[in-house]
Amino acid sequence: MTNTLKKAIFTLSLVFMGLLSVMAQQNQFPSQIWHKGNIYGTDGQVFSGLIKYDLENNLVQLKNESIITLTASNVSNFEIYDELYGGVRNFYSLPYSLNGDYEVPVFFEVLTQGDDIVLLCREYIATDSRSMGAYGAMGMNPFWGPQTMVGYRLAFNYYFFKNGKIQKYSLKKKDLYDYLTGHDDEIDLFMRKNRLEHDKRGDLLRITAYYNELNKN
């Protein structure tokens, strides 16, 4: 390989990594942008405007004429219209022990609810490291081998509210049936017929909603 070709490949590598950096900066997650919505305080006040939420610290901000920050302790619930992913999303402040010590007000998003069980979730931004390998965008770099692209992805923890208690879902299929009791055959058929997974947000929502419908009969 000539020195000229090596320099050309090295330059292309730098350009590509620069593009990745720009793309990462432009990529925003729902918690990083302002949404139209309403905040309902524990004292009965209702605030309307642009809303940004921080589930990690259980904070919600309202931007109207100025910016105010509220905690899960003084907010009963808030709702936003998520233009990034579409649709209205609802969050409630519920007592829960995140670290195993004692219960404090914590924001949960309500995905679906029924008389028997409620599916909740808390989103977070996770580090996503993927090896690009021989078939990645840059292929095999002759100098350093397979390239690794480090980015971020939106991830979720799921919870079931049942019998007055919030319990974290392990994402194991056998544990799902422990929550959705009494209709194992119907749920199994529903999942296979609709090709639903037990650990995906939209699929888990449909499965839980179906279970609540079965309990109405």
Image: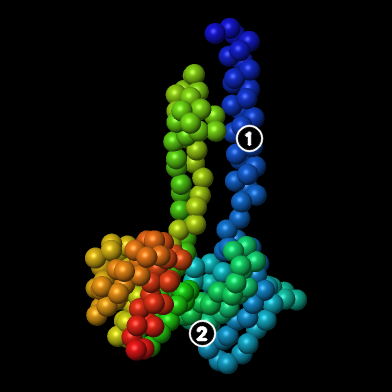
Eyeballing the image, is 144 above or below 106? above
Check disc 2 and give the amino acid type: Ser
Question: Is residue 96 visible in the rendered structure shown here?
Answer: no
Image marks 1 and 2: residues in contact by CB distance under 8 Å = no
Tell which of 2 and 60 is nearer to you: 2
Number of marks present in the image shown? 2
Q: Which quadrant is the C terminus positioned in?
A: bottom left
Q: Quadrant of residue 63?
A: bottom right
Relative height, residue 55 to residue 64 (above, below) = above
Q: Quadrant of residue 155?
A: bottom left
Tag shown at residue 18: 1
Side of 58 where 178 appears, left or right: left
Residue plotted at (41% across, 77% down)? 209
**Crowding at mark 1 (Cα within 10 Å: few <14, some 14-19, many 20+):** few
**Type of amino acid at the residue the image marks with label 1:** Gly
48 left or right of 215 in image: right
Is residue 122 in view from this perspective?
yes
Q: CA distance from mark 1 to mark 2?
A: 44 Å
Image location of residue 58, percent across then percent down: 49, 71
* Quadrant location, the N terminus: top right
Name the element at disc 2. Answer: strand
Using the rendered view, name the quadrant where residue 212 is placed: bottom left
Circle 1: element type? helix
Q: Which of the numbered marks, if any, corresponds to residue 87?
A: none
Q: Residue extending furthest front?
A: 193
Q: Residue at 69% x, 77% y: name it.
A: 49
Disc 2: which residue: 76
